[in-house]
Amino acid sequence: MGLIKEPKNVDLSTKSEPWTEKELVDFRKIMQDIKDKIAKRKERSLRLKADKKQPA
């Protein structure tokens, strides 16, 4: 894999601006929602696997 040259008339560098408090709160809420969904799915799949292993 080699280096990719930046085109002459395109600037690929970006300047990051700090997030506002509202943006941070929104981002944290979205991340927590995603983590909760993943945990629910994982818990459900583990429960289903445990149910399958138990003899009827």
Image (cartoon, rainbow, N blue to C red):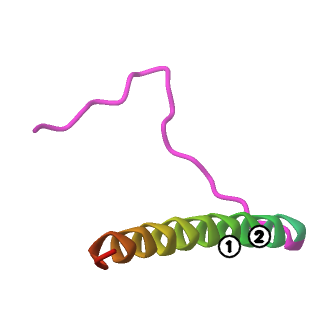
How far apart marks 2 and 1 lie (CA) works out to 5 Å
Q: Which residue is mark 2?
A: 29
Instruction: Indicate the position of residue 45 as horizontal and vertical percent values.
Output: 43, 67
Disc 1 residue crowd, few under 14, some 14–19, many 20+, Cα 10 Å: few
- Above or below, 19 against 15 in this view is below
- Which one is in front, 38 or 27? 38
Q: Which residue is mark 1?
A: 32
Q: Residue furthest front?
A: 56
Seen in the image, is 17 located left or right of residue 10?
right
Q: Which mark is residue 56?
A: none
Q: Secondary structure at mark 1?
A: helix
The boundaries of the magenta stretch are 1-21
Seen in the image, is 21 located left or right of residue 18?
right
Q: Residue at x 38, y 22 (%)?
A: 7
Q: Secondary structure at mark 2?
A: helix
The verdict on residue 12 being magenta is yes
- Above or below, 41 against 56 in this view is above
- Quarter-of-image position of residue 2: top left
- Which one is in front, 6 or 55? 55
Seen in the image, is 43 located left or right of residue 2?
right
Instruction: Indicate the position of residue 20 as horizontal and vertical percent values.
Output: 85, 68
Amino acid type for the residue under numbered disc 1: Gln
Instruction: Indicate the position of residue 1 as horizontal and vertical percent values.
Output: 10, 38
- Which one is in front, 29 or 1? 29
Amino acid type for the residue under numbered disc 2: Lys
User: Is the C-beta separation of discs 2 and 1 under 8 Å?
Assistant: yes
Which quadrant, please, contains the C terminus?
Answer: bottom left
